[in-house]
Amino acid sequence: MKFLSQTFAIRTERGPQFLDITDEVQQTISAAGLINGFAVIFSKHTTAAIRINEAEPHLIADMEEMLEKIAPACHDYAHNRHAHAFSDNGERPNGHSHCQQLLLGASESVPIENGRLVFGQWQRIFLVELDHGRDREVVVHLIGE
Amino acid sequence: MKFLSQTFAIRTERGPQFLDITDEVQQTISAAGLINGFAVIFSKHTTAAIRINEAEPHLIADMEEMLEKIAPACHDYAHNRHAHAFSDNGERPNGHSHCQQLLLGASESVPIENGRLVFGQWQRIFLVELDHGRDREVVVHLIGE
Amino acid sequence: MKFLSQTFAIRTERGPQFLDITDEVQQTISAAGLINGFAVIFSKHTTAAIRINEAEPHLIADMEEMLEKIAPACHDYAHNRHAHAFSDNGERPNGHSHCQQLLLGASESVPIENGRLVFGQWQRIFLVELDHGRDREVVVHLIGE
């Protein structure tokens, strides 16, 4: 019975951006020697999400377009008017980033069998940057044997 | 190796409402003496969700506005016409509440390190009431050591 | 302390379709003799999601309508133009399916107490087919005692 928690530092370049972290997650599992169990993948941020989908660049452009349509960056967010109005700490208006993140979520849980994530053929796991590029942290928590 | 499952009764006042339950979850972890592991936070309801975001009141108003835009309360839902048409049990038309909950989800999983949720600076966990105010139940399930 | 991972083959008939898999998940728990713990329910697909809501047919029609409104099948997706333009493997244009799945998610985690999912009165768990009908796989991973 093993527990392992590992935090990854990831530098995003822009928002929106889908960063494929599948290899890092799989390497953590392999290095830990975990055979059966599962992984919780968790974003430590309120404007960057964890999601599983296909790593097809045109599709990712479609998904970014949908997120912008649901919560456009240019919308008049109360959060931008009030919380960021006098910000002098480099924060930019990001009401849309929070709203989009609310729809995507902070965690996914994935079973592990025979030392591998049980992913189907097209599944890849992403840190989804919804704000501007910055340093981010993702926690991979493993439990199993 | 410990398992602990605790159910919290929570009274919501209205919908939509974001109720910050971070302190209750953290207290459960501390009381259990759990050092490493993780928590599953689960809503027992189809019109109240579990989500992690920032507890900034203007932002929460923005998120409520987005949810209302995606699935407006006044829309003509088949669920309201059929399932609630002759309701005499106090149920109100809530097609929008179900639709919004579908997008947010019933659970989040959060790693625990050194006895604490591994939350980033702005992360708080919410029970999101999407129907009218009522008694709700949230289950916090801990596993770890 | 038990781990059990079981993969279910499910044939969907059309998209969108909400397939209630609650009984299969509960039977897996009962057959494993698991009393306390929790279940991770995971879709191995990028166009089929796992979600918990109410199994009311009119409501499901409402939820399908909302998903179609957010990401319409007829929209001009780059994924359809590029990745599927010359497909000869039976794939159909499914940009909308991926976009909708991004919003719903691949997994839910549900606590188990006294051998039962801790579901509230109306909760049922669904594999949500967002593409056309086909063979699908859902993994149920149990951990507990």
Image (spheres, coloured by chain):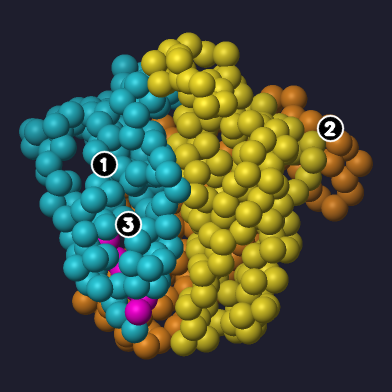
Chain colours: A cyan, B orange, C yellow
Above or below — where is C33 with respect to C136?
below
User: C31 or C119, which is in the foreground?
Assistant: C31
Q: Nearer the viewer, mark 1 or mark 3?
A: 1
Q: Amino acid at mark 3?
A: Ile
The residue that label 1 is drawn on is A20
CA separation, marks 2 and 1?
A: 44 Å
Which chain's residue wears label 1?
Answer: A
Q: Which residue is mark 3?
A: A41
Q: Is residue B2 magenta?
A: no
Asked if the residues shown at circle 2 and circle 3 are in contact, with their CB atoms under 8 angstroms apart, the answer is no
Q: Secondary structure at mark 1?
A: strand
Magenta span has A143?
yes
Q: Residue at x 68, y 78 (%)?
A: C30
Residue in view at x 66 percent, y 50 percent: C10
* Nearer-the-camera pick, A26 or C69: A26
Which quarter of the picture shows residue C116?
A: bottom right
Residue B94 relative to residue C81: left or right = right
Relative side of A103 to A96, left or right = right
- Tell me where residue A21 appears, x and y as whole percent: 25, 47
* Bounds of the magenta segment: A139-145
Q: Main secondary structure of the magenta part?
A: strand
Q: Amino acid at mark 1?
A: Asp
